[in-house]
Amino acid sequence: MTYTFESGLAHHIEGLIQQKRADGYAYHAEEKLLKRFDTFCVQNYPELATVTYAMAAKWSGARPCEGDAYHNRRMSIVKVLSEYILSLGQEAYIPNFFCKAYRPALYIPSKDEVKELLRKMDIRTSHNSEQLRLDRECKILFLLYFCCGLRLSEGRLLKWEYIDLEKGILTILGSKGSKDRLVYLPQDSLPVLKSYKECQEKLFLGIDWAFPGKDPHKPVSCSGVESSFNRHWAMLPAAGTLDKHPTPHCLRHAFVVERFNEWMRQGIDTNTMLPYLSRYLGHKSPDETYYYYHLVEKAFDTIREKDTVSGKVIPEVVPYEE
């Protein structure tokens, strides 16, 4: 483990982390948050070996500049810890001190919007050379998210040793659920990636991260990726007309929708292709993949184009009753 736990809950915290990692979860961010909770317990409840109401209530207190989403993350980790303690046959209080945090509505950008986003990333938004370098990296990252359907961490944690630009294959190791898989790159992306690699090798000799962060010995951070996306998305005409909040992950959704629509345009049976797409995305089952497709109305544009029946159906008349 990265941290040493010292409170009366240390044994339970360590057991929870071990269990989660045995189930295939990385649990790094959660371990960091559990360490903060452990420190809180040492300072306020050093003798307690379980979660109590008073402990949870004090932990739930608002903190300076803390948003609802982070508050809920803090409370959620304690709830999971309490559930773990209960599963051992011991008593624990399950907290319910949650805020109704804002959840970004799912938005699937069109192919044209993604192209426009990538074009906007060529525009300087800062005089800081470090920021310009990170934006250039993020442009390639966003291209991979859209062209390959990668998860946020799968892209930003890529190393050059797992990127074969001759064969056009990415090797994704230890992804969600401890799954490894191969991802095939579109042929038209290879020249862009080769040019990017040549540039990066000159800048960062001996650094294996494909997308190094401010500290080149570490990968670009999640917040850095999200910040770059938000700044450039705000430059798109669509940004001012949407009551939704897109995120970099929406590019993965867009990849799925584009695949389905393309198959339908070509008359390919989507049910036959679904298991292959599911494996490509690193999903547990095809149901997870189909979930993306049902979330958005935009995904059915092709169905409407091919539907020659619905426009000829006489609508049902509901009898008027006095």
Image (cartoon, rainbow, N blue to C red):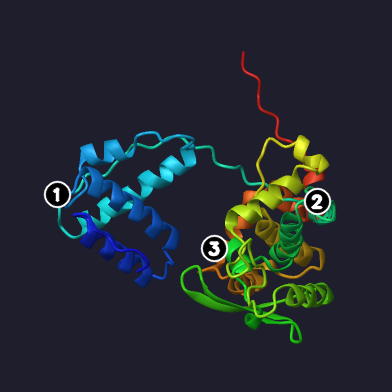
Disc 1/disc 2 C-alpha distance (Å): 56 Å
> Measured from the top left, where is residue 143 in percent x and y?
75, 64
**SS for callout 3:** helix
Residue identified by numbered label 3: 287
Q: Residue at x 69, y 57 (%)?
A: 251
Q: Quadrant of the C terminus?
A: top right
Whether the residues at callouts 2 and 3 have beta carbons within 8 Å, the answer is: no
Question: Is residue 83 left or right of 320 when viewed as pictured?
Answer: left
Where is 157 relative to 60, above or below?
below
Rendered position, 227 above or below 186: above
Whole-Å distance between the Cαs marked 2 and 3? 27 Å
First of labels 1, 2 by sequence position: 1
Mark 2 or 3, closer to the camera: 2
Instruction: Pinpoint residue 118: horizontal percent, then vertical percent.
Output: 81, 56
The three-letter code of the residue at mark 2 reads Glu
Identify the element where label 1 is drawn: loop
> Residue 102: image x %, image y %?
53, 37
Residue for point 35% across, 34% down: 61
SS class, disc 2: helix
Amino acid type of the residue that numbered disc 3 sits on in the rendered structure: Asp
Reading the image, the residue beneath label 2 is 113
Location of residue 180 with respect to 319 vertically, above or below: below
Q: Nearer the viewer, residue 220 or 305?
A: 220
Residue at (75%, 82%) from the top-left corner? Answer: 165
Distance (Cα) linking label 3 and label 1: 47 Å
Residue indicated by mark 1: 47
Q: Are marks 1 and 2 in contact (CB under 8 Å)?
A: no
* Quadrant assignment, res 140: bottom right
Mark 3 or 1 closer to N-term?
Answer: 1
Question: Which quadrant holds the N terminus?
Answer: bottom left
Cβ atoms under marks 3 and 1 closer than 8 Å = no
